[in-house]
Amino acid sequence: MELEFRVLGSLRARREGREVDLGRPQQQAVLAALLLAPGQLVPTERLVEGVWGEDDTRWPKDPVGQIGTHVHRLRRALGAPELVVAAAGGYRLAVPREAVDLFRHEAAVAEAVALRHQEPARARELLGRALDAWAGDRALDGVPGAFAERARERLAAGRFAAVKALLDLDVALGRYADAVEPLAALAAGHPQDEEVHRLHLLALHRCGRTEEALAVYEALRERLDRELGLEPAAAVVELVDRIRRGEASVSLRRLPRPSQLPSDIPDLVGRAGLARRAEQALRADGGSPVVGLSGPAGSGKSALAVHVAHAVQDAFPDGQLYASGGEPGTVMAAFLRALGERPAGCAPVAELVGRYRAALAGRRVLVVLDGVPDPAPLLPATSGCAAVVTGAEPGVLSGDAVRLTVGALEPHDAHELLARIVGVERIGREPAAVAELAEICGHLPVLLRTAATRLAARPWWSVADLVRWFTERG
């Protein structure tokens, strides 16, 4: 049985070429949540919050039962009860990603972005085909619920990024007349996106409408000064200067590739299994995987997060973003600058979120959030991107995130860590004292590393001396 689903517009399904009646709006909201994670378990709690919101005072009397009813009706409507699989704590839609228009669209966009410098004409063709998949102005149009609304915001940002990339290619390929009016409309709808304004000015100039381009620039400069107290971006100012000198040329904008990861720890021990599971999750095809690391202070969550991020760099060629602590607005503004954007200092978080999602759309970027108090707004929702998060509170990460617990080291791993820093021969001479030192440190890597560094700096001390030093200080 052949089933196809559309989310880029009104939610629709076709079975063997015939339209399927998807029933009531809330039933459609359940289907939408399952469709955006095909093949993955979606927890029932997430479905409840996605349909009725996080305020449980607004939930119906038996929300879990109602979700079950909606699932039963969806199975009947789709004509294939086996497609919606009940599992522990949730449901899974057993359809391939290719059956959903969104994932065909995202695959075409990703391929186009990869080809935009080497084969711009082919990239332009792919982007055009990807954007043709949209059957309306809003994704999941008419579908209620918080989940659908969040998805609409994310998909709108991705669509904007794809349109901007297509118009960038139009200008680079000399299709100035085709690009002018769409760029004018895009600039009007996104007045603070200065890259759109840059493209608009260049297209106007190349069409022979130089005076109009300069007038548009002056209007932009006055508006930015009046509303934000800012000057236009350096790239826009440079373009206008070159237009005035008659030197403006056409070139594809090369996006910055941030590389913000701290140095890897060369002597990480006892974490091979956890690292392997995290790498597998981050390298998974499709979606935007999230790995959450939790554990007690001193367990080395941060070191493991950085180690894993270094190990998968090749899977994220468009860069790696890193933040240790910080409020979402501050971190997001810094990330945007690293991605080549120039956010206003006073911009609200909601506006920054939209620009952040648009900046990530079409790229493969890894985001590492180490102890950020509220990581949720900073998690990439763009297919092809991924995140590693440490210390997130329970319930912050979505139900499909991979959660790994980082605990104390095994005794033999603690011994190896000490030996790597202090020296095998020196550690091997005092096995009993080494075991006692590891016990004092709770077998926690951070404390063990601190103790080993202290011992390495005092070659005249024995391990027993260090144990005695710790004991005397309680």
Image: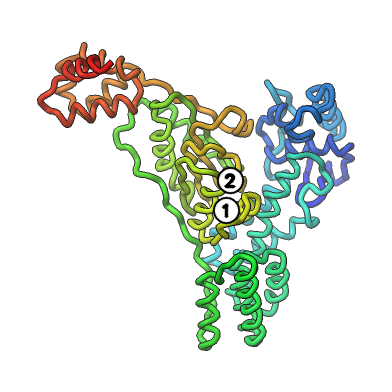
Image check: 170 left or right of 138? left
| Residue found 73% across the figure and 44% down from its top | 99
Q: Give the residue number, with chain letter if any, for mark 1.
A: 360
Whole-number angstrom distance, CA of label 1 to CA of label 2: 7 Å
| Residue found 68% across the figure and 42% down from its top | 97
Residue 96 at x, y percent in the picture: 69, 39
Please say if 262 is above or below 438: below
Asked if residue 169 can be seen in this view, the reply is no
Please state which amino acid type lies under the numbered disc 1: Leu
Residue 162 at x, y percent in the picture: 65, 60
Q: Nearer the viewer, residue 77 or 308?
A: 308
Q: Give the residue number, with chain letter if any, for mark 2.
A: 380
Q: Spot the residue most to the top.
A: 432
Q: How many marks?
A: 2
Q: Quadrant of residue 125?
A: bottom right
Residue 454 at x, y percent in the picture: 21, 28
Specify which label sits upstream in the sequence, 1 or 2.
1
